[in-house]
Amino acid sequence: MRIFDLAVKDIRQIVRDRKAFLFLLAMPITFTVLFGIGFGGFHAGENADLRLPVGWLDEDNSAASIAMHAMLSQSQVVRLVDAGIMRNELMAQVDEGTVAAAVIVPYGFGGQLRDGDVIPLDLLADGSSQAGFSAETEIQAAAQRLFAAARAAQISAAIAEAHGVSADYDGALARAMAAWSSPPVTVYVTETGFSAEDQTLLGSANAFANTSPGMMAQFAIAGLLSAAQILTLERKSGSLKRLLTTNMSRNAILLGHFVAMFLIIFAQMSLLVLFGQLFLRLNYFSAPVATLLLITMSALFSASLGLLIGVQAKSEEQVVMYALVAMFVLAALGGAWLPLEFTPETFQRIAFMTPIAWMIDGFQEISVRGLGLTAIADSLLVLLLFSVALVGLALWRFRSEER
Amino acid sequence: MAQSTAIVATTLSKSFDELKAVDAVTFTVARGEVFSLLGPNGAGKSTTISMLACLLRPESGDATVMGYSILDDPQAVKACIGVVPQEIALYEDLSARENLEFWGKMYGLRGAKLKQRVDDVLALIGLTDRQKDRVDKFSGGMKRRVNIGVALLHTPDVIIMDEPTVGIDPQSRRHILDGVKDLNRQGVTVLYTTHYMEEAQELSDHIAIMDQGKIIAGGTHDELVTIVGEKDRIEMELSHSAPELLSQWGALEGVEAVSAENGIVTVLVNDSNRILPHLFGAASQHDVRITSVTIEEPNLEAVFLHLTGRALRD
């Protein structure tokens, strides 16, 4: 009971602090809107080319390679990127995930094709990823068409030659390729949804899908300033010492402050989620249980961080410094400011070492991809593990003060 | 444990790294008395009461408060003490009433009893009219009063006060000292630390003088000044020099010594009240007028000076 009395006292102090309101609600809403508008607002993806980027390197420059380029250029799935770079640089781009795949047309490709031989195209793709697999399938389908067209052109040229007519292989190839643009049979396949990876590569049409959870994560840490300062002031004023002369244990005191921080951040995130749902066209309510659990775990992580800051800091200035450093570093690395799909793969790997990236990813799984509890299970687990580690550290630091 | 004792400290010791803050301190506080630990800053007073309040664990020795060991039963000890820390241990952004209500809850009070005790304490500290004001709007003295009030909420048997009058105006100081006396009259045992000799002298039934982590002397005020063995000192200014008068004063019974320096005559006596009329009578016989008189009784300052060679506020 006394734990909750302590928490209620903390919450009363926080609510009375005007600067707490600034960090808890005013600033996150303002920054979410500003960053969202900066990234294109609700229409960020409307004019964007959503096809998978595929690197293109033509070492042959033949009629066949030009035909292949023309065919892939009309693809609904892939978008050719004529990088004009070397083979090894292209390979690096595939490794980094800058492009979903790369096609290299080797020297002699067209000539061999004309002679009826097949030199395989050099296709670089990560077949284990959904994007790589999709690109690979589309390129192979195009290659099959090219080979079929080349075979048709070859037969056509042979027949013409047999009839004593001048053989026009290139013309026959062009006509055969043109025939693919109006195939006799077309099969339409409707996909029921994107995988997470596809969506990451393609980007979301609503820029708020990233800025909303990003700013939520960032200002959950900033919102802890007042709460953590209460702990520091308590130590400075002697109130902590006085609390310890009551029958409350050190752990109970720490738990009381932790409950206050958790409830404050939980309320903050719930309001920001509601704001996103009502005004930013984000569908957080598509999976209410998952959203609630993710808010809970996110608040748990933020409160754990706040507790550690409050225990570690010796002055109000140190609280501000620790909280701001944690906020800036975690927010910047975790993708709160810039969608991670705009960053290289190495950066993304580092980002997912921070809980913020998992937090944002979890909220995007729900609000953008319409997924539920299963999809955010890893985010929940990561946030829980970080929380346990931080609370453990805070407890250890707090108890070590007892001499 | 005998019911007549409230606190028994037995060879309590505590070090911080190389510093021996408290060194085998032993004393007994009887129930219902005011007991002062008197000493300069850094003497070990606060460390001693921190151990008694179960904030610090002694590295050796033990103490009992109302019969409960601080080592074996700290929760029981905490239940029967109220601590007034040296700092203003309050939440300044809360009102006086909110502070008292919060601390009352921390001491386990609830409901009607909590409300009643908060009302009682507000009346006791004279802040009923200002109960809704935030503490940060209060003067230093008012904050001190709330600080003390918090420790009274759960009607503890023992109040431990750590230099409660540091840095406040004379009026608030007077209020606090009178409050301590009132509490004591109600039967509350008070353990009081101070470096103000006058406070210890005014409030205490027993005094322990601490220096460098040790108790160097203890007893009642009268017992302590006996240690010094000093006499009352009477300093006088005369209308004119009269050597024969000084000889006559020196021959009076009860006068230990007479000396004159820079126009001021100093007479050391056993009992100034008894001797003074004789001094005035002799002066009249020699037609000498006494133009000023100052009497200094032996005090705790002198005791501390005698025992340590240093002034109490050094």
Image: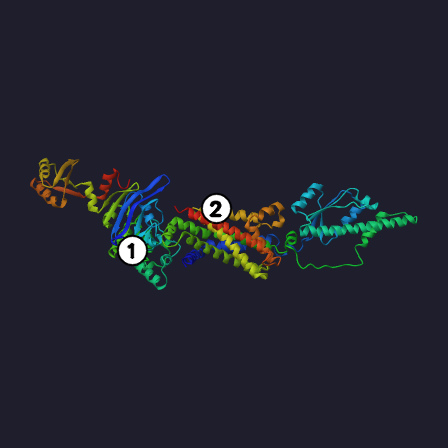
Residue at horizontal 14%, vertical 42%?
B270
From the viewer's side, name the closer residue of A80 and B54: B54
Q: At numbered mark 2, what does the secondary structure look like: helix, strand or loop?
A: helix
Please state, as top left, top right, bottom left or bottom right, where the C terminus of chain B lies in the image. Answer: top left
Viewer-nearest of discs 2 and 1: 1
Q: Is residue A211 visible?
A: no
Kindly indicate whether the residue at mark 1 contacts the one at mark 2 (C-beta within 8 angstroms).
no
x, y percent for residue B287: 8, 40
Q: Residues within 10 Å of mark 2 (few under 14, many from 20)?
A: some
Chain letter behind tag 1: B
Residue at horizontal 41%, vertical 50%?
A233
Badge 1 amino acid = Asp
Decide if residue A294 is on the left or right side of residue A13.
right
From the viewer's side, name the closer residue of B241 and A346: A346
Decide if residue A203 is on the left or right side of residue A294.
right
x, y percent for residue A87: 71, 41
Mark 2 = which residue?
A321
Q: Is residue A378 visible?
A: yes
Badge 2 amino acid = Met
Chain letter behind tag 2: A
x, y percent for residue B41: 31, 43
Mark 1 = which residue?
B157
